[in-house]
Amino acid sequence: MPYISTTHERVSVPSCDDISGVSSIRSCLCENFPLFATTNGNGTIRFLFSQYPKQEDPSLRRANRPISRPTLSSPRQEHNLRLLCHLRLLNIYYDNCCFNRPYDEQSQLKIRLETEAKIYVQQRIIDGVYELAWSYVMDYENSLNPFLERRDRISLWKSKAKGFCDENETILIKAEFLRNGGVKFFDSLHVACSIFLKCDYFLTTDDRLMKKIIPEIRVIDPIEFIRREEIR
């Protein structure tokens, strides 16, 4: 069983792969200490506190102890630590062309790879590693799909989304700004919604959209997303 290592004590906790039993640990640690967290290869979770615990024994204090931001050695460890410390999971927005990638002609290698990557990321969403965002624009554009089966399959993902937004003035203003920069109509609305929802990534298979410089969000394809977030 791994342990939490603080400045002066060890506390036994459930395995990193079993998050169900750590809610009390979360609340205890995160209420009392501003902290960073990291793990090592054997499953030890190490919390580095940015200040010492309340009612600390002064004899345990180390003078001028440096605090540095740790690095996480794997996406799985990062996911577990986000849950432990109440950190927000990565929020992903799929646009319509990304959702429809599996229905495109698969004879081209690029399309096949994007399809496999898109399906893989969706499974990670189901597993709770990432969170999906949805918008009124996705509802509307998907409703225009002439293929009933595709439309119904895609619409099922709305129930798995953690974030949703309706049309509002902030989105419309941002979308107009993006269109002035050369982004197409529906793309501008999708991107504006993803920014409004504070998403971390906007996943698309539209090469022209990926070439646009949009500082508020990372616009990439599913293959690049896996390269950045899964392969460390």
Image: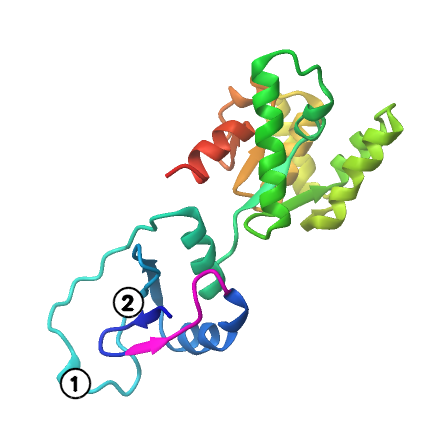
Is residue 174 in view from this perspective?
A: no
Q: Residue 222, how many percent across, how many down?
A: 55, 30
Q: Mark 2, residues whose alpha carbon is within 10 Å: few (<14), some, or many (≥20)?
A: some
Q: Residue 61, how many percent across, how many down?
A: 16, 78
Specify the quadrant that holds the C terminus.
Answer: top left
Q: Residue at x 51, y 36 (%)?
A: 217
How many marks do you count on the picture? 2
Going from N to C along the chain, the mark reached first, 1 or 2, is: 2
In this picture the colour scheme is rainbow
Q: Nearer the viewer, residue 180 or 37?
A: 37
Q: Are marks 1 and 2 in contact (CB under 8 Å)?
A: no
Is residue 110 in view from this perspective?
A: yes
Q: Mark 1, residues whose alpha carbon is within 10 Å: few (<14), some, or many (≥20)?
A: few
Left/right placement of residue 7 relative to residue 96 reads: left
Q: Badge 1 is on which residue? A: 58
Tell me how far mark 1 sits from mark 2, CA to CA.
16 Å
Q: Which residue, as the protein is rendered here, is positioned at the far front?
A: 1
Q: Quadrant of residue 157?
A: top right
Q: Is residue 73 above or below residue 114?
A: below
The residue type indicated by label 1 comes to Pro
Left/right placement of residue 204 relative to residue 11 reads: right
Q: Residue at x 52, y 42 (%)?
A: 200
Query: Which residues lie in the magenta part?
Result: 10-18
Q: Badge 2 is on which residue? A: 50
Tag 2, which secondary structure?
Answer: loop
Q: Nearer the viewer, residue 147 or 32?
A: 147
Magenta: predominant secondary structure element? loop
Q: Is residue 59 above or below residue 183?
A: below
Specify the quadrant that holds the N terminus.
Answer: bottom left
Q: Quadrant of residue 103?
A: top right
Q: Residue at x 79, y 30 (%)?
A: 141
